[in-house]
Each structure stands twice: as structure tokens, then as C-alpha cells.
């Protein structure tokens, strides 16, 4: 299916680059659709003998046709259909960055007849025109939102078609079996007998592969969205010092802002390729030492929002009842790492603490936030306990939408296999098999409804 530059679609436009005051030396207004070139010609004055040819850059000015005012100096890139991202004619105006000029340019483009693009609408057109399958389109969106180099690598594997290939192949294998089965439903007598055991083996193999992908999705999730780790501990155990230590080494603090809805500090950093949001209760300074005033309510909030809890205590002061009270707050089943700080002051070795070490039994790791000793062990152990310790091998990973569909396909295959085990007639095998095929088609976009597409693309950013 290809939508060409006929009147079947309108022309859309958006700013394709990030818009921030005083930032970005270049900003791009992207126009796609049948009117793109006409709008470009109407607004862009290219001096001299420059030729309007596809895939050629023109130099000139964006001019307000009403007043003749030069709005910005710019480059214009024309990409005629179908050789563009959307496979429609695309015009890009490369203007100066910042806020004002680029927005003026967009307004002129809209006034000249384009419509403001919805989030993800360029990508949606690329998909509808057969330029991309759905997994690649989603991977592009993930590339833009990637918060670590590993997450970007994962997105790139998706853009390269790694996921499309994996899922597409599994779907083909199911379609082969479905064709065999459906043929038997209609023409059993005319065909050679079906090797039921071989069908079962194939369905089971695909089911196992899907389950494997679902299991690996968790790791992709960690790389994409990172972990929320609550740091809790009595006052002065070294929570701020640990935060400083972690952020210094990484030099990767993206934001450091007071929690918007509560008195928590949130810091974002990347540790060993995994984006982490640290929820820090260090700003909470109770007036006395009493357990009730430890800011337990706030600690509870941090704990409730976290994937993992990092409980610090002071090795030089020893394990106290207050530490025990905080440990008891960790939600059931949450990942908990108890780390003893100030190993230097307590003259203790740093690193992993053996479980049979009676003296410091409550600690899983010991470290010194001041000297940095034991820092690597602390990070490695935290990531390991969160299931993020072995992410090196992850090549492709399903996102949440894809994971749910792959999971549903695996469940349907189980139902098919159950029908097989009960030796039901072929058409009982095919019902759930067809559902599994449809689920996988929804991942790649081979079989997908408009409503699903709208939902997928609405999560993209504007201009993509
Ligand atoms: P918070 O209240 O938990 O955030 O604790 P801080 O990070 O503010 O640290 C409290 C005090 O402990 C400060 O004076 C730090 O210098 C000190 N401190 C933190 N970590 C260490 C450590 O590893 N060794 C020693 N000797 N002192 C530390």
C-alpha cells in the first residue's frame, strides 16, 4: 500500500528538532505531503540560479509572502516522493535554532496550507506507505527517548530490523503450520496424512522462543526505563555522600531536582549502562533521633515508588534499632540491599560481606562513601539483584506493547497444544493458532487495526 502525492492525504508540518530558548544552533521545520513543495516555493526565496531538484540543498531566506519580510536565513532540502522518510514529498527548512524564528517559520508554513502534525504522524505515514514496519517505527521512537548508550544500541538493533526479523520469522513458521492444518480441515481426504507430532513440535518450539523473548523483555525494560532505587537510612549515615560519589564518577547527572510532589530528591544517572533514578531521602532532617521522626512517612513514599531499596547504615556506629526499623519498611518482595558505609572509620574491609560474617551480619556490602572504596561492588550487587547484571548479551528486546502481544501469542499456542494433546480435530487446533498469528502480526504491523496504530504513534514526539 502506498499513498502517493495525490489528494488522498493532506500536508502536515511540525518542528522536528527540540525547541528551547537560546539553544540549538539549527532548527528544522519538516513538511510532508502533496503541497510540501508548493509551500516551500511559496515561502522560500533562493537567490541566483539554484535549481529545485530533489535531494539538493538550496540556500536562501524564508520570506513572509504577505509582507515580504525576511523571517530567517535558511537551507531548504527537497525530497520528492517516494524518496523520503514518509514516501511523500518532504521539504525541510533548516532555520536558526532557539524559539522565535523557527516558530514564525512554522506559522507561515501552516498559513500556507499545511496542517500541524500530530505526535508521530510522520512515522505513521512512513508506516502506512510501507517505508517501515511497526517494530522499526517504535525503535525510532525509543532511540529518541534512550537514556543510556545501551538503550540506544537496543533501539538501533530495532531500527535495523532485528525485532522484525525475529517476530516475522516466528509468525511465518506459524503460518506454515496453519496452512497445513487448514488444508486438512477442508481437504483431508485429498492430501497426504499430516505428521501431527511434527506440527506439535513446531508449535512448541515457537512457543518457547516467544516465552524467551518475553523473559528478555524485562531486561530491555531496565535498559530503556531504568530502575527507581530508594536510598534510605538514618540521618548522617552518608546518603548524600553516596549520591555525590555515584554522580561524580559518572559525571552523568541529567537532572537533580526536588521531587515534584514530595520532599524527595530525585537524581538521574547511568550506572554500568543502566539508567537509574535515585530517590533520596537525604534532604529529610528530623529534629531528634526518635524513630517516629525519621521521616518514616516520606521514606515509605520513596519505598513504595521504588523498584529497589538501598538501605545505608553507619558501620562505625554499628547496626541500631532505627536501622532495623527502616529495614522493616521495605515492601515485601522488593529488592533490598543493605550497605554498611564508613568502612574506613570502622577499619573494616570493603566489598561484598560474606553471609556468615557474624560481626557485620546485616550488611550485604560495605563501602566508604568518602574514599570511594567498595563503590563498584555496591553498584554491581545492586544491579545484579535487580536482574540488570547480565545485560551485555541482550540484543533485541520487546517493549511493553510487544511483550504483551508475544505473551498472548504464547498463551494461544499453549491452547493449541492442549487441543493437540486431547487429539481434537484439526479445526480445534487452528482457532488459537490463528489468534497467535494475529498477535504477532500486531507486533510487526502486518495485521493491525487503525485504533492500535493511533495508540502506538500518539506516544511519539511531535515532529517524528
Ligand atoms: P546523610 O545525612 O545520610 O545524607 O549523610 P551525609 O552524606 O550528609 O554524611 C554525614 C556525615 O558522615 C558527613 O560528615 C560525612 O562526611 C560523613 N561520612 C559520609 N560517608 C563517610 C565515610 O565513608 N566515611 C567517613 N569517615 N565519614 C563519612
Image (cartoon, grey):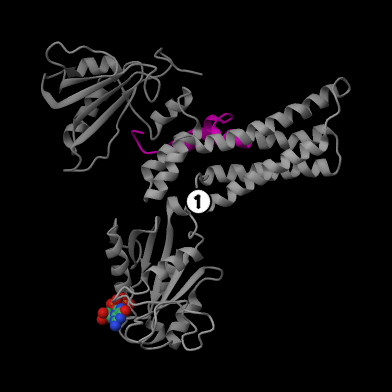
Rendered image quadrant of residue 305: bottom left
Residue drawn at x 44%, y 29% as measured from the top left = 124
Q: Residue lying farthest front?
A: 349
Q: Locate residue 80, reporting x and y percent.
A: 33, 16
Residue drawn at x 46%, y 40% as measured from the top left = 157
Residue 37 visible in the current orientation: yes
Q: Locate residue 67, reporting x and y percent.
A: 11, 19
Q: Locate residue 38, reporting x and y percent.
A: 27, 14
Dot 1: within a 10 Å radius of its alpha carbon, few (fewer than 14), some, or many (20 or more) residues? Answer: few
The image quadrant where one finds ligand 1 is bottom left
Is the CB of the residue bearing disc 1 within 8 angstroms of ligand 1? no
In screen coordinates, is 353 left or right of 56? right
| Residue 446: in magenta span | yes
Residue 98's place in the image compared with 384, above or below, is: above
Which image quarter is the C terminus in? Answer: top left
- Label 1 element class: loop
Which residues are the magenta region?
439-464
| Residue 97: in magenta span | no
Viewer-nearest residue: 36 or 214? 214
Viewer-nearest residue: 220 or 347? 347
Viewer-nearest residue: 198 or 189? 198
User: What residue sits right under mark 1 in the picture?
Assistant: 393
Rendered image quadrant of residue 165: top right
Residue drawn at x 30%, y 72% as measured from the top left = 240
Amino acid at each position: 500500500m502506498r499513498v502517493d502525492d495525490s489528494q488522498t492525504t493532506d500536508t502536515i508540518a511540525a518542528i522536528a528538532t527540540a525547541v528551547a530558548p537560546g539553544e540549538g544552533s539549527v532548527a528544522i521545520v519538516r513538511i510532508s505531503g502533496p503541497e510540501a513543495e508548493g509551500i516551500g516555493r511559496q515561502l522560500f526565496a533562493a537567490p541566483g540560479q539554484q535549481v529545485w531538484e530533489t535531494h539538493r540543498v538550496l540556500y536562501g531566506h524564508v520570506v513572509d509572502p504577505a509582507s515580504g519580510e525576511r523571517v530567517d536565513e535558511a537551507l531548504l532540502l527537497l525530497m520528492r516522493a517516494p524518496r523520503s522518510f514518509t514516501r511523500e514529498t518532504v521539504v525541510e527548512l533548516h532555520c536558526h535554532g532557539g524559539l522565535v524564528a523557527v516558530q514564525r517559520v512554522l506559522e507561515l508554513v501552516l498559513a500556507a496550507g499545511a496542517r500541524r502534525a500530530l505526535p508521530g504522524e510522520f512515522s505513521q505515514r512512513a508506516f502506512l506507505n510501507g517505508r517501515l514496519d511497526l517494530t522499526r517505527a517504535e525503535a525510532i521512537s525509543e532511540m529518541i527517548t534512550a537514556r543510556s548508550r545501551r538503550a540506544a544500541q537496543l533501539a538501533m538493533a530495532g531500527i535495523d530490523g532485528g525485532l522484525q526479523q525475529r517476530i516475522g520469522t516466528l509468525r511465518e513458521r506459524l503460518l506454515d503450520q496453519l496452512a497445513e492444518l487448514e488444508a486438512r480441515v477442508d481437504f483431508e481426504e485429498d492430501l497426504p496424512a499430516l505428521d501431527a507430532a511434527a506440527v506439535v513440535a513446531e508449535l512448541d518450539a515457537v512457543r518457547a522462543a516467544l516465552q524467551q523473548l518475553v523473559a528478555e523483555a524485562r531486561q530491555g525494560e531496565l535498559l530503556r526505563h531504568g530502575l527507581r532505587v530508594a536510598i534510605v537510612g538514618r540521618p548522617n549515615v552518608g546518603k548524600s555522600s553516596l549520591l555525590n560519589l555515584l554522580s561524580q564518577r559518572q559525571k552523568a547527572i541529567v537532572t537533580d531536582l526536588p521531587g515534584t510532589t514530595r520532599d524527595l530528591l530525585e537524581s538521574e544517572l547511568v550506572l554500568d549502562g543502566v539508567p537509574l533514578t535515585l530517590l533520596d531521602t537525604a534532604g529529610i532532617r528530623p529534629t531528634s533521633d526518635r524513630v517516629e521522626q525519621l521521616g518514616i512517612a516520606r521514606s515509605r513514599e520513596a519505598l513504595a515508588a521504588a523498584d529497589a531499596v538501598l538501605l545505608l547504615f553507619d558501620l562505625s556506629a554499628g547496626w541500631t534499632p532505627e536501622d532495623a526499623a527502616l529495614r522493616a519498611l521495605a515492601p515485601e518482595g522488593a529488592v533490598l540491599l543493605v550497605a554498611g558505609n564508613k568502612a574506613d572509620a570502622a577499619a573494616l574491609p570493603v566489598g561484598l560481606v560474606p553471609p556468615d560474617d557474624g560481626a557485620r551480619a546485616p550488611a550485604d556490602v560495605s563501602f566508604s562513601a568518602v574514599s570511594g572504596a567498595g563503590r563498584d561492588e555496591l553498584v554491581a550487587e545492586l544491579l545484579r539483584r535487580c536482574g540488570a547484571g547480565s545485560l551485555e548479551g541482550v540484543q533485541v528486546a520487546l517493549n511493553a506493547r510487544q511483550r504483551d502481544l508475544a505473551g498472548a501469542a504464547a498463551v494461544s499456542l499453549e491452547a493449541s497444544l492442549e487441543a493437540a494433546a486431547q487429539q481434537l480435530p484439526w479445526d480445534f487446533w487452528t482457532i488459537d493458532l490463528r489468534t497467535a498469528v494475529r498477535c504477532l502480526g500486531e507486533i510487526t504491523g502486518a495485521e493491525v487495526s487503525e485504533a492500535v496504530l493511533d495508540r502506538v504513534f500518539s506516544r511519539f514526539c511531535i515532529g517524528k
